[in-house]
Amino acid sequence: MKHNQLIIETDIPAKMRDGVTLYADIYRPADAGEYPVLLTRLPYSKSYGLHFIRPNILAEQGYVVIVQDVRGRYTSEGDFVPYIAEVDDGYDTIEWAANLPYANGDVGMFGLSYYGYTQILAAISGNKHLKAIAPIMAQNSMTDVFNDHDGALELGMWETWNLESMLPNMLARTYKTHDELEEAANTLMKNLDNLDTLYQFKPYKDWPAIGQNEMPYFSELLNYEPTHDHWRKIDAKSNYDKINVPGLHVAGWYDCFLDKTIANFKNGHLRGLGDKLIIGPWTHANFTQIIGDRDFGMAATKWGEANMHARHIEWFNHWLKNEPLPASAPVNYFVMGLNDWKTAENWPPQNANMTPLYFKNEKVSAEFTPPATSSEAKFSYDPENPVPSNGGGALHKALHADGPHDQQQIELREDVLCYSTEPLKEAIEVTGPIQVKLWAKTDAPNTDFTAKLVDVFPDGTAFNLADGIIRAAKQHGANVQNNINEYTIDLWATSNLFQKGHQICIEISSSNFPRFDPNPNTGDSFINSTESQIANQTIYHSPEYPSHILLPIIR
């Protein structure tokens, strides 16, 4: 039943256990009765920040829709530190919402990115009123998307997100006079225009674009080790057993939270909670057909605006109103290159066979047969001249846009090794998780190794599919310098049909900036240091040290 008349109430207070008041806007049917609640909690403004879904459309379907500013943001009281209050505040808000006079006691949660993770943290809280969630492109920890992406700092995302998305409201809360706020806002706009230069600034803890008084947590969190107790309470991975509600998970092959969204799904799916997973060719919060420099066709818009609402309504109608859920497999994924959808009962698909593609120092430098002879390749990595980011699962501004982009110019660099197959005689579908097993040596105390999977078209256009990084000491501690070590580089996952005549290419290097902070090769970090040195890297391909990529080939 569609409810054509709605009541919209703004700035409705909810008091948390410590006395802090958070404010929400509520959309609900005008017809008398009790309805299930759909709640979202976001830091981007309850009035202007909810872009991907419209609360009035959900309310028309017989829901009380609550959009709340999280602690320390916009209308809500308190101090903002990313995620730190979201478990307790999530519990308290659900309890408050379930007991509103027009609510029936059942609550679902929805939202994307930050307000995808507020759902997962609320689920950890164990509130019994929460019946289902729909975390779209959501993470499962803070450290994995910040200071411990396999040892590296996701520099571009940390600086861009805080400057572009978090700082404007924090300036309004910091500066009380019109002149002070206007000056701070003008400085912010100049810094956003100059962001590519600001990425270069070292040490990161003293980044001049954000004042200590404006955002106290910015530098403080940079100096917290991944094992710091601060992260424990807001880590979903170590609390998965506390999540006992089904989740509708939507991911993108070029999303910065791809692997986390997959992990969130697998937790619920393997425990029989009823979770669903959809993976499209998308970047973060972009569900269109044109992603980066590629057009994936109309099929890619399956989760466009109208369908996004319909799928949410179907999901919550099932779990909150006991209506049947349309039949669908647990996993729906988009195959790039084929530009169409497939289904699977599990992730990865059961017919994905992990197949090694070996690196060689020959004309055809990537083959499915192991190397019979020994060879090696060398390059030098200079932290002051890192390989520039060019697409991928990034969350940067402008020049470092996410998604698929042509890598040909990057592959001309002397510090980028390219291992390529001959043109394929038949098409190969690769769907599932991807890893590089790299045998390498460095003369530095610590360094990084990066890998990128690329689809090379017959005209030479080289589109990136997946990439990853490993900070050497993360896997080998003090045994990095001058030792031949095996490094495992996690490229997360993809689904791509390499068409006949295309080539499979793997780029190996030691940097991807500003997506990741360059390793100074000194044993220290640019978080607190400005010193660096050049690292001389050797990659091995031999029967003893068979460097290769593991591809999940569909058979």
Image (cartoon, helix red, strand yellow):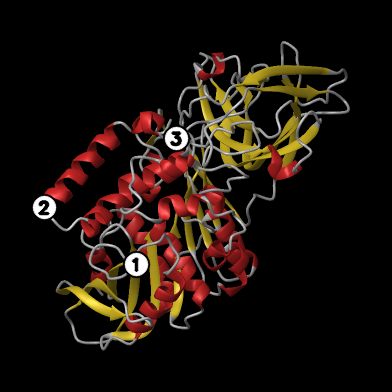
Number of other residues with Cα within 10 Å of mark 2, as a class: few under 14, some 14 to 19, many 20 or more: few
428 lies above or below 361: below
Instruction: Out of 459 and 258, give the one closest to the viewer.
Output: 258
Judging by the rendered image, the residue that carries numbered circle 1 is 40
Judging by the rendered image, the residue that carries numbered circle 2 is 178
SS label for mark 1: strand
Q: Nearer the viewer, mark 1 or mark 2?
A: 2
Q: Earlier in the sequence, mark 1 or mark 2?
A: 1
Q: Residue at x 23, y 40 (%)?
A: 187
Question: For the residues marked 2 and 3, what is the alpha-carbon distance in whole angstroms?
Answer: 40 Å
Judging by the rendered image, the residue that carries numbered circle 3 is 403
Residue type at mark 1 is Thr
Find residue 541 and report its image quarter.
Answer: top right
SS label for mark 3: loop
Quarter of the image with the C terminus is top right
Instruction: Out of 70 and 291, give the one closest to the viewer.
Output: 70
Residue type at mark 2 is His
Find residue 67 and report its image quarter.
Answer: bottom left
Mark 2 and mark 3 in contact? Answer it, CB < 8 Å.
no
Question: For the residues marked 1 and 2, what is the alpha-carbon distance in whole angstroms?
Answer: 32 Å
Instruction: Out of 141 and 255, give the one closest to the viewer.
Output: 141
SS label for mark 2: helix
**Measured from the top left, where is residue 73 in percent x and y?**
29, 63
Instruction: Out of 138 and 80, give the one closest to the viewer.
Output: 80
